[in-house]
Image (spheres, rainbow, N blue to C red):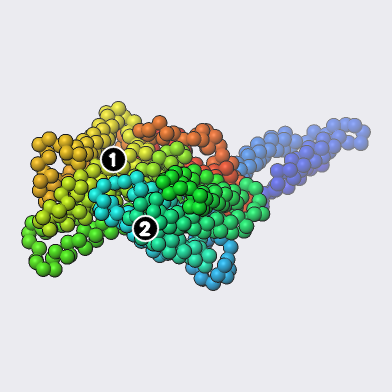
Amino acid sequence: MNIFRKTPSKAAPPRAVDFEESVHSSSLSENNSNTNSNGATIITGNGKNNTKSTSKDIRYYKKEIKKEKEGKRKLYHSLIKLADELKKLRSQTANLQQHDQYRNQTWYEGGLWRAPQVLPEVQREVAHNQRARQREAISLSDMFLNLVIVTGFTRVGLAITSTGQVQAESVLYFAVVWTIWGKEASYSSRFDTTDLSAQFETLLACFAVLFASLSVSLPMNSEGGARIMMMAGFCSFLHVCLMGRVLWWYMDAPISTVEHHVKHYALYNTLMNAAETATWILGWLFVPPDWRWIIFLLATLMALRIPRAFLANDFHAANSQRGVLFILLLGFMLQSVVVVATDFFQYDTPDTEQYFFIGATCLLLFCIKLLYCDDANTLASDHALLVNRTAAWFFNIGQFALLFSTTIMGSGLNLLTHSYLAAAAALPGPAKSLVCGGFAAVLLSTAFIKSMHLKRVPIIPAQRALFVGAYAIQALATVAVAVISILMAIGEGGYLQVLMQNDVELMWVLSGFAVLLVLLSWLDETLELALQGENEGDTGDFLVSPFGFWWCLTPEVDPEEMLVEEAQAAQTLSRRHPSSGARLSEFSPLLGESVANMKLSTVDLGSLQY
């Protein structure tokens, strides 16, 4: 009996299982066909050929099956990668939609007394080297508050101008105004401030700061000191109400979410503000006037907060607020100098020497602005606020010292301008001493703030030595100029003391020192550009590693632990609600990226954009 085998067509090849079954059945039928009913074997002529053809087809289809499996496996992996990319794109699109919704929301959305909303920047996870932000970092209300705060600073400066020296009362008064600004900035960099409750609280805080600034020229044991205590206690009570409202809205927040950290943050600040309010009230009612300085010092320390406690802030918005406050202070100082000079120029046209004096003052303030550590030019991963809490605390103290020393220098500039234009030397000594001493304090404060940030130096020893030498030259030059200014302020400047006899020469010498320091501050960037130009295209020559000058510039969380938690958080965010977060939300949305950069010390310097 002939055996017929069905040959599969090329258009529709049979499945591997069906082919094996057909081969098995054909083999059985071939064996059965070769044996008759009597048991005699019938040898057919095509049996051997069919067996050879069948074995060849089996090998061919096995190869086809293997190719098909490999193709399906590649397609499966491609689909997995595509699904991951779609998940990332969906998460990024959700953040953009959230930003757009926040920007375009109507003022009446949710009512005038709507619930406090956490800023989108606090909730989102910032990408590698992310600097761009989708929202204005500082609102007009915050700008107005900064104007009021700077008015309080300048009022303290006018008190220093009237006395001609820096007293402890001026330091404490300045600290009270600065802590009020710190509370307002802390809230506005974490929560939405467009609702009526936040706007009303900001307005009342502006009233309190303005009323308190009218009494900063009075002694602490007078009625003016009592009024400042009342206004400071009132501002603390405002934040008790504000944070209490946040606590009430987020009381039922689930664990392991950003809202849960918001609840703890609100509870902590409510208790601290309540204790500060009680300190101000009890000190005003029961403490003798001669001992009020203890209340001022204690309440000021209680107003300080642990950096990144329980809830991260909008890092870029907070940096913008610090920069705007400093620029406004410089602007008020320049305006004050011009106002002092205006009375003299009403009766006589300024001559060339007077133009040089005003120009030197403007140049000095502009160079101080250039020397100021602009946080926008600092990588978030290298910022002191995101390294650990100790570095962040020292960074805030450096900011206070910079603002106060700038105010002292502004007071000296007012006195120096008046004495120069009056040509009577009515107040010769204190003016020059305040200018030189304030300038030295500004330089040291700026250098201290810059030293709190991580530096990145090349790994190659020769290039590393160049960068370390550049940083050393900058530091030594800053210290040298500061020491010279201090010696001139206390009358021990030696032959440089002759500069104290001429106001115009003094201003131009200080401006020259400032210009020199600005040029030296660009030395590291010049070296970076030079090295890139010499080895263009060879990225291996631009590997850098982080370098911290102070002992506190080390991560407070183990890098290995941080990287593991980052991976777990990324997997969790793909399955949970976008508002959920891991332990990293307690510190900062940028902290994980910061430690990851520190561990991966081989960073391409050419890819870093400034």
Camera-nearest residue between 211 and 181: 211
Pointer 1 residue = 444
Give percent across and percent down for residue 284: 48, 52
State left or right for residue 581 relative to residue 599: right
Which amino acid type corresponds to the residue marked 2 in the rendered image?
A: Ser
Which amino acid type corresponds to the residue marked 1 in the rendered image?
A: Leu
Give percent across and percent down for residue 349: 9, 66
Direction right: furthest residue: 38
Residue shown at the point (30%, 27%) measured from the top left: 461
Residue shown at the point (24%, 61%) measured from the top left: 335
**Secondary element at image label 2:** loop
Pointer 2 residue = 215
Above/below status of 238 relative to 529: below
Give percent across and percent down for residue 282: 52, 50
Direction left: furthest residue: 352
**What is the spatial separation of the Cα atoms under label 2 and label 1, in whole angstroms?**
30 Å
Q: Earlier in the sequence, mark 2 or mark 1?
A: 2
**Secondary element at image label 1:** helix
Give percent across and percent down for residue 555: 46, 35
Q: Viewer-nearest of labels 2 and 1?
A: 2
Above/below status of 39 relative to 327: above
Above/below status of 41 relative to 67: above
Residue shown at the point (27%, 42%) measured from the top left: 441
- Residue 146 appears in the rendering: no
Camera-nearest residue between 37 and 538: 538
- Residue 196 appears in the rendering: yes
